[in-house]
Image: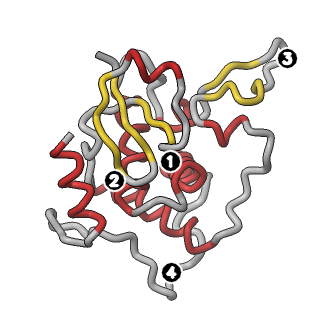
Amino acid sequence: MKIITAIAAIIMFGVSIASTPVVADTSPELPGELFTKVERPQLYCLAKNIYFEARGDSLAGRYAVADVVLNRVKDIRYPNTICEVVYQGRQDSNGRMIRNRCQFSWYCDGKKDNTPNAEMWRQSQAIAYQIVVLGTFRGITEGATHYHATYVDPSWNKQMDDIGRIGAHLFFRAP
């Protein structure tokens, strides 16, 4: 847990521990869309998850949420692609997602999945690119496959190993 806290502090204060940039590029000359769903579908899915799960969180928190998705992709208990992990959930007999029965709550919350905050959407895309393509801060959650917001206490976390807190989320992995 001390390691995760130290890494989070390094990211939050913008100290580079790698040769890649620490912060998402938010320069005004970048377009609102760095890539599209068609061009890079896996990065797009990850960016959507970062945006909806952690757009109000610290930079470290957003990287941590992305890291959990990638940890699930590598874990045999979960689907094999980023999009399959992000959109995993229970379906009714007609194949429609059941409300509030998804791995990531935003996907089955009944709300539209628009990204109205262009700046946060661009940052989410940059983080998705940096963690997948460049490996920036990959491993920040020390193998966590689960997380939840600090203001909730779900029953499933009792059976998990507590990894620590980054930003507005607590991170866990199966023992």
* Residue at (79, 20) in percent of width and height: 95
Q: Which residue is mark 2?
A: 131
Whichever of labels 4 and 1 marks the residue nearer the N terminus, that label is 4
Cα–Cα gap, marks 2 and 3? 36 Å
Cα–Cα gap, marks 4 and 1? 19 Å
The residue lying toward the viewer, choosing from 3 and 143, is 3
Whichever of labels 2 and 1 marks the residue nearer the N terminus, that label is 1
Under tag 3, what secondary structure?
loop
Whether pointer 2 and pointer 1 mark residues with C-beta atoms closer than 8 Å, the reply is yes
Whichever of labels 4 and 3 marks the residue nearer the N terminus, that label is 4
Category of crowding for the residue at label 1, using alpha-carbon neighbours closer than 10 angstroms: few (below 14), some (14–19), many (at least 20): many
Whichever of labels 3 and 1 marks the residue nearer the N terminus, that label is 1
Where is residue 76 shown, x and y percent of the image? Answer: 37, 17
Whether pointer 4 and pointer 1 mark residues with C-beta atoms closer than 8 Å, the reply is no
**Which kind of residue does numbered mark 2 sit on?**
Ile
**Which kind of residue does numbered mark 1 sit on?**
Leu
Q: Quadrant of the N terminus?
A: top left
Where is residue 86 shown, x and y percent of the image? Answer: 55, 36
Q: Which residue is mark 3?
A: 94
Instruction: Classify 61 as above or below 120.
Output: above
Q: Quadrant of the C terminus?
A: top left
Say the numbered circle drawn on residue 46: 1
Q: Is residue 95 left or right of residue 155?
A: right
Q: Is residue 111 left or right of residue 156?
A: right
Say the numbered circle drawn on residue 149: none
Q: Is residue 31 left or right of residue 169?
A: right
Cα–Cα gap, marks 4 and 3? 41 Å
**Which kind of residue does numbered mark 3 sit on?**
Asn
Q: Which residue is mark 4?
A: 30
Where is residue 45 shown, x and y percent of the image? Answer: 56, 46
* Residue at (47, 32) in percent of width and height: 81
Q: Is residue 42 left or right of residue 36?
A: left
